[in-house]
């Protein structure tokens, strides 16, 4: 009897490991295929990335209405902007994970693989069912779940409970840091900003914490500004300060199948490894995490 129970337990563990592995292999093959197709199929024209019939086609975004009292908002400017334009429900409540997947894909031109991964990951962290459940935007602000310290756009949770509100001083600092043409943001600008934010948070915040996966998450946020927004300061200004998509805006990623995880990772690594403020011992830890992470939460930067 014992042998049967033990064997079946062991088998079920092995099967779930295999299933996970197959899941990961399937995911990365899917993503890599899309990356390859992107190389072959001609790009969208810069002013025609968002498809006909989707909000924002031709740069005409649905009306922007700032959040009202009682509306749910979160630490992520990209999701708040969708709600402010009514592309997600304006009150930010009762959003299904599938709805999130579809809208992020339509508006920001992330690859289907990316858009599948992120809501699944959020559902996992919130312990909800991806297929059937929904969430309010503020639900993602559970500290050190998705939300974490040393943000470029929010005060640390220790100082500010309302992660739904932009920190104007932090954003102003970011907006003034661009060293590219027209003050646009470069990879090294973002590495430097992230490094400073971590050092400052560590100094000021008695409850500061930053796990390796949250570091990667932070550099993923920054990488979104470099990829989807092309570092363009004139677009990033209203996007971060008002969480508004400017009229005429289109994603800067022109690939037919959008920004894949594979391509995005390259930017994330450049940003993260460019951070000089990091101690070398911490860098080692981080490199190990980069090497070990399966489909961890390193790169969901919505
Ligand atoms: C959430 O939306 C679903 C339909 O998408 C609806 O059936 C449900 O009643 C809503 N829940 C709340 C609390 O509004
Ligand atoms: C990245 O986004 C999360 C969730 O919106 C936020 O909590 C975090 O502070 C951001 N990180 C950085 C470095 O901006
Ligand atoms: C992207 O980076 C993560 C580490 O954060 C890694 O686990 C994953 O395999 C990478 N994905 C691809 C498609 O390169």
Image (cartoon, grey):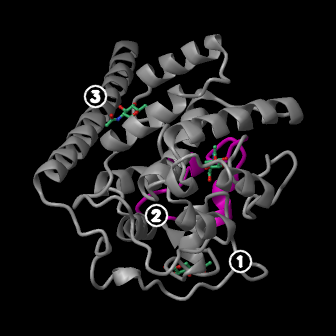
Kindly identify which residue carries mark 1. Answer: 71
Mark 1 Cβ and ligand 1 under 8 Å apart: no
Mark 3 crowd level (few <14, some 14–19, many ≥20, 10 Å Cα): few
Relative side of 200 to 266, left or right = right
Depicted 5 relative to depicted 82: above or below: above
Q: Which mark is residue 97?
A: 2
- Nearer to us in this view, 54 or 173: 173
Task: Establish if 68 lies above or below 194.
Answer: below
In terms of sequence position, does the residue under pointer 3 or pointer 2 come before the other? 3
**What stretch of residues is rendered in magenta?**
124-149
Give the mark toward the camera: 1 or 2. 1
What residue is shown with label 3?
18
Q: Earlier in the sequence, mark 1 or mark 2?
A: 1
Task: Measure the alpha-carbon separation of dots 1 and 2.
Answer: 18 Å
Q: Quadrant of ligand 1?
A: bottom right
- Residue 176: x and y in percent read 68, 53
Answer with mark 3 or mark 1, whichever residue precedes in sequence: 3
Q: Is residue 295 left or right of residue 231?
A: left
The image quarter containing residue 197 is: top right
């Amino acid at each position: 009897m014992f042998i049967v129970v033990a064997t079946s337990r062991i088998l079920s563990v092995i099967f779930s490991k295999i299933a996970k592995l197959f899941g990961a292999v399937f995911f990365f093959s899917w993503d890599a295929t899309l990356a390859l197709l992107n190389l072959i199929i001609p790009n969208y024209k810069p002013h025609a990335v968002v498809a006909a019939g989707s909000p924002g086609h031709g740069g005409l975004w649905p009306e922007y209405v700032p959040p009202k009292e009682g509306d749910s908002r979160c630490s992520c400017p990209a999701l708040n902007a969708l709600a402010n334009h009514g592309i997600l429900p304006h009150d930010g409540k009762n959003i299904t994970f599938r709805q999130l997947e579809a809208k992020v894909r339509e508006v920001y031109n992330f690859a289907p693989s990316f858009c599948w991964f992120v809501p699944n990951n959020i559902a996992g962290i919130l312990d909800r069912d991806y297929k059937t459940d929904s969430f309010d935007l503020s639900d993602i602000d559970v500290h050190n779940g998705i939300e974490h310290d040393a943000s470029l756009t929010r005060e640390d949770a220790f100082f500010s409970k309302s992660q739904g509100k932009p920190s104007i001083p932090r954003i102003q600092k970011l907006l003034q840091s661009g060293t590219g043409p027209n003050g646009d943001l470069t990879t090294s600008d973002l590495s430097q900003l992230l490094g400073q934010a971590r050092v400052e948070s560590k100094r000021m915040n008695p409850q500061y914490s930053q796990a390796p996966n949250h570091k990667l998450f932070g550099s993923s946020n920054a990488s979104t500004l470099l990829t989807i927004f092309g570092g363009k300061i004139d677009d990033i200004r209203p996007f971060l300060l008002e969480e508004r998509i400017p009229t005429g805006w289109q994603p800067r990623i022109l690939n037919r199948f959008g920004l894949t995880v594979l391509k995005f990772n390259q930017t994330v690594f450049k940003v993260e490894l460019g951070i000089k403020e990091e101690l070398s011992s911490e860098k080692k830890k981080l490199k190990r995490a980069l090497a070990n992470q399966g489909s961890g939460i390193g790169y969901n930067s919505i």
